[in-house]
Image: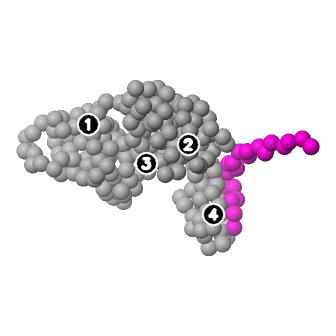
Amino acid sequence: MENQVQEKKAPRIVLPGEFIDDLKGRKTNAGVYIQDDKAYSQVVGVPRVGIYEVSVVPLSGKYIPAFSDKVIGVVKEVEISGWLIDINSPYMGFLPLSEGVEEYVDARADLTKFFNRGDIIACRISRVTKTKSVQCSMRDMMARKLNGGTVIKVTPSKIPRIIGKNGSMINLIKEGTGTEISTGQNGYVWIKGENQALAMEAILTIDKESHMPGLTEKIEKMVGGKINGTQE
């Protein structure tokens, strides 16, 4: 009898307006709309149908800031009372002086000694108003200035896939490339280390092929490591 190889199936991809499943009292996410107790996709993406939720992970899209999000930001302008921050969104972030530094700063002080144009920071979204005025904060354990390195942009919804289960994928890339990596929910990824180019290639591959089968094995081969115990 011939051995049969079981092929991994590529996940289903839905288009806007496409039926996903009967709702049956389950929750939905922003990628889904409800009509006659049925769930339909609002975006192009991969549907996730679970016991408690019906959702769609979009294959592309812009980052819309939300309270408490961890983001990687790039300082665009230094103003009198703080800094304008590029957070990879249609809406700029603002880091006020009171949220950027703990010490007392004179009103006439040169704020570039703290953060200057082009500086990269890891910070939190501390407030989002109804008019989408976005405030950033460095008053968080994870917040810090990221010295050196480079920032690449990926699809924000792919960040969980880049991190992997319990950090498995991101740790694989870090160890295989000898790099430091920090990810933001806004789709910016900071990379610094001896093999930034390989780390960048691996992350961009995940961004492009996150919905494809066999991705974990491909990344393991690319960076020369292995994820133990789980298959992504």
Residue 185 numbered tag: 3
What's the residue type where badge 1 is placed?
Glu
Label located before the other in sequence (1 or 2) = 1
Label located before the other in sequence (3 or 2) = 3
Residue 227 numbered tag: 2
Question: Which residue is under mark 1?
Answer: 77
- From the image, state whether disc 4 or disc 1 is nearer to you: 4
What's the residue type where badge 2 is placed?
Ile
- Nearer to the camera, 23 or 226: 226
- Nearer to the camera, 175 or 106: 175
Question: Which residue is under mark 4?
Answer: 50
What's the residue type where badge 4 is placed?
Gly
Q: Would you say 115 lies left or right of 29 here? A: left
86 over 37 or under it: above or below: above
Tell me the distance, in whole angstroms, between the alpha carbons under discs 4 and 3.
23 Å
Label located before the other in sequence (3 or 1) = 1
